[in-house]
Amino acid sequence: MRLIVPLPGNEAFAERLATAGGFELGRLETRRFPDGESYVRHLSDMAGRTVDLVCSLARPDPGFLSLLFAADAARDLGAAQVSLVAPYLAYMRQDRRFKPGEAVTSRPFARLLSGAFDRLITVDPHLHRYPDLAALYAIPTATLHAAPVLADWIAAEVPDALIIGPDEESEQWVAAVAARVGAPHIVLRKIRRGDREVEIVLPDLGAWTGRRPVLIDDIASSGRTLIEAARRLQAQGLKPPVCVVVHAVFADNAFEELARISDQVVSTDSVPHPSNAISLAPLLASALREPDAAGPARRRRRSESGAVTTEGPG
Ligand SMILES: O=P(O)(O)OC[C@H]1O[C@H](OP(=O)(O)OP(=O)(O)O)[C@H](O)[C@@H]1O
C-alpha cells in the first residue's frame, strides 16, 4: 500500500488524500536544531514502499531543505520509489530572464526536485512560456487539471453564471470550464506592468448584466489580476463576481481586498487557505491509484559512496 507522508502544514490535505485513495498515512518529525539547521525523522517504515511526500509549495523557501532531506532519507531507509505530490508547484513564473543578470529560477528549482524525487505529481502548474513540465523537469511528471472540479462546483453553486477568464492565456481552460458548466464565457485582456501592477481591458459587457460573473484564474498571488478585473466588471454595471481560483497563494491582504468587492471567493485546497472550498484530494487520489499516471518512474540505485544513479526515462 502507498505511504503518504505530509511535510509540515500539509497534514490535513495528506489525510484527505489518504482517505480518498485508501492509502496509509505516514508521519514525519521535523524540528530545528538550536543553530537553525533542519532535523528530519521518518516515523514510518519505508523499506520497499512506494512513498509519496505531500508538500504544497506555496512559499517554499523556509521548508525546502527539509523536503529534500525527507526525500533523501526515505530512499536511504529503503523506499522503492519516492514521489513528490505538490498540489501547487512553485517557481514556475520566473521562466525567463526579464532583466539582465536575473536567475531563471524555474530551471534550478526543477533541477533540485528532479535530483531528489523519482516523479512529480501536480495540479495546473503555471505553464506560461513552457509547453509542459517535461521541458523543465528531468523526472516523469503528471499534470492534473482542476477545471472539471471547478466546473462542478460552479454548476452546483452559481445559477446563471457568466464564466470569465482575466487574460488571453486563460482562454483554453476557461472555455473547458464553461462547456462543462453549460454557461457562456468571455476572456478579458491583461497587461502586466509589474509584480503588483496589472491593467485589465474589457469588451462591452452590457449584454451580460443579468448574469453572475464568475472570474476564474489559476493563481491569486498579489490578487491584482482578480481585483482589477472585479472592479472593471462592476464599473460596467455587472454584479459583484464569484472568484474561483485554483491556487490560493494570496500575499499580504490580497484575499481581504478581493473578498470586499466580490460576492464570494473560493479556491481548491492546493494551498491551505480559509477560502478552500473545492478539494483536489479525490483527483490526486485517483491519479495515484493509476500505476502509470506519471509514466514509468525512474529506477534509482544508491552506490556505496551514496551517489544516486538514474535509469529509465528522464
Ligand atoms: O494575483 P496576481 O499577483 O495578479 O498573480 C496572478 C496572475 O498572474 C499569472 O498570470 P501572468 O501571466 O500575469 O503572470 P506571469 O507573468 O507570472 O505568468 C496568473 O495566471 C494570474 O493571472
Image (spheres, helix red, strand yellow):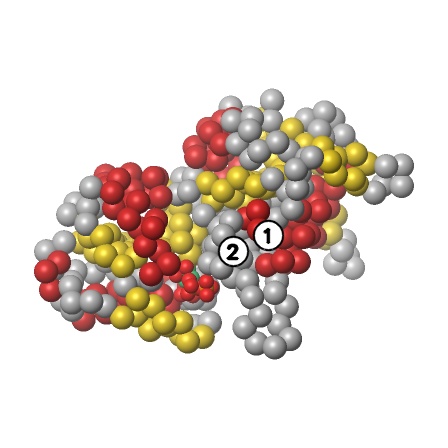
At a point 59% along the width and 56% down the height, the residue shown is 60
Under circle 2, the secondary element is: loop
Q: Is mark 2 within 8 Å of ligand 1?
A: no
Decide if residue 82 is in sight here: no
The numbered dot on residue 267 is none
Is 311 or 288 nearer to us in this picture? 311
Is 17 or 100 nearer to us in this picture? 100
In the picture, which quadrant includes the N terminus? top right
At a point 61% along the width and 62% down the height, the residue shown is 105
Residue 308 rendering spot, x and y as whole percentages: 79, 41
Under circle 1, the secondary element is: loop
* Residue at the extreme right: 304
Residue 221, compared with residue 269, is above or below; it is: below
Residue 136 rendering spot, x and y as whole percentages: 59, 52
Q: Does the residue labelled 1 lie within 8 Å of ligand 1?
A: no
Residue under numbered circle 2: 130
Residue 296 rendering spot, x and y as whole percentages: 61, 31
Alpha-carbon distance for marks 2 and 1?
8 Å
Residue 307, compared with residue 97, is above or below; it is: above
Residue 280, compared with residue 96, is above or below; it is: above
Q: Quadrant location of ligand 1?
A: bottom left
Residue under numbered circle 1: 136
Decide which of tag 2 and tag 1 comes sooner along the chain: 2
Q: Do callouts 2 and 1 mark residues in contact (Cβ within 8 Å)?
A: yes
> Does residue 161 appear left or right of residue 4 in this picture?
left
